Image: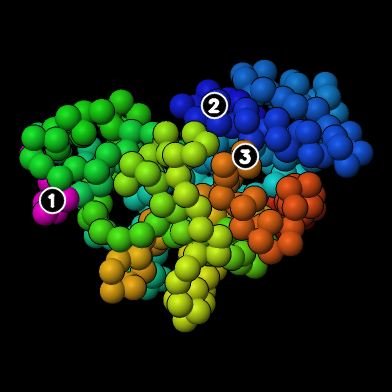
Amino acid sequence: MGGFSSEREISLKTGNAILRALKGSGYQVVGIDADRSLARTLEQERIEIAFIALHGPWGEDGTVQGLLEMMRIPYTGSNVIASAIAMDKEVSKKMFLYHHLPTPAFQVLRPDDVAAGISLPLPVVVKPVCGGSSIGTKIVRTEKELAESLQQSARYDNRLLVEKYVDGNDLTVGIIEGEFLPVIEIIPKSGFYDFTAKYNVGETEYLVPAPIPAETTAKVQALAVSAYQALSCSGAARVDFRMDSAGDLTILEVNTIPGLTETSLLPKAAALAGIDFVALTERILASARLHIGCGASG
């Protein structure tokens, strides 16, 4: 947990929640704040299985997964390739399109492209290509806001994703080992599910299960599994959607290390499915694998 990314504080919250749950169940658990001596610490602590609670770059992007594979330590979540693809919104969206899965129209800007502007009509959503927790993400409705938003997002990545804004509702589906959980509808008080809305209690209303027709529920769950499979994910993940007024669904992204804090979505969905927090952490732990080569499990 912890690490160096802009999501460090959330990662520590997730890690400490997992730590308490597993210790309470009798497991021998040690919390490791990941730093540059991580490999040495893993050896010193004689770690048998790594429960990854690192969010963002260097933890969710395949980096730490590669280290664990080199050290022959089984770990939770997706392998190196799936983690890297899911973290890179440009590549993951291209994978969605390749598999004929719906995702909002987009373009990617690099530093030299910013001055030329965008090709998509406003409004758009600007976000770092490799980022999470909505850090650096902005809804842009006017030309005046565009330059400022591009500049702010560029502080977090040298590639920016400019995505068509879909006016509608936020939905999310948790997945554990390829099995979907109940759909959650997310209603932020501010109208935008940003960092503040995600992690401050009372800033967002969560409807579990989402009050949508049974047919739509089945469709969004099936799309979530398809997105999970398209990126070759494993273990626990969460797929985020937008649903417009016509009920049409678009996939925004797949999170391969979902948060496990008091406001996190995966535990809320699991609870409705009869899986309490302790049982959820144990199920994720039991899914840990030692991935070999390009994705086979050992």
Residue annotated with mark 3: 262
Residue 291 vertical placement versus 230 (above, below) = above
Q: Quadrant of the C terminus?
A: bottom right
> Is 249 in front, or is 268?
268
State the CA–CA distance, disc 2 to disc 1: 32 Å
Q: How many marks?
A: 3
**Which label lies toward us, 3 or 2?**
3
Identified by mark 2, the residue type is Arg
Residue range (magenta): 116-123
Residue 82 vertical placement versus 113 (above, below) = below
State the CA–CA distance, disc 3 to disc 2: 16 Å
Q: Are marks 2 and 1 in contact (CB under 8 Å)?
A: no
Tell me which label, 3 or 2, sits earlier in the chain: 2
Residue annotated with mark 1: 122
Q: Are marks 3 and 2 in contact (CB under 8 Å)?
A: no
Q: Residue at x 56, y 50 (%)?
A: 265
Q: Quadrant of the N terminus?
A: top right
Mark 2 crowd level (few <14, some 14–19, many ≥20, 10 Å Cα): some
- Judged by its main secondary structure, the magenta piece is loop
State the CA–CA distance, disc 1 to disc 3: 35 Å
| SS label for mark 1 | loop
Q: Which mark is residue 196?
A: none
Residue 295 vertical placement versus 178 (above, below) = above
Identified by mark 3, the residue type is Glu
Q: Where residue 171 appears, x then y in whole percent? A: 44, 60
User: In the shown orientation, is residue 189 left or right of residue 109?
Assistant: right
Q: Residue at x 47, y 68 (%)?
A: 211
Say which quarter of the image contains residue 167. Answer: bottom left
| SS label for mark 3 | loop
| SS label for mark 2 | helix
Residue annotated with mark 2: 8
Tell me which label, 1 or 3, sits earlier in the chain: 1
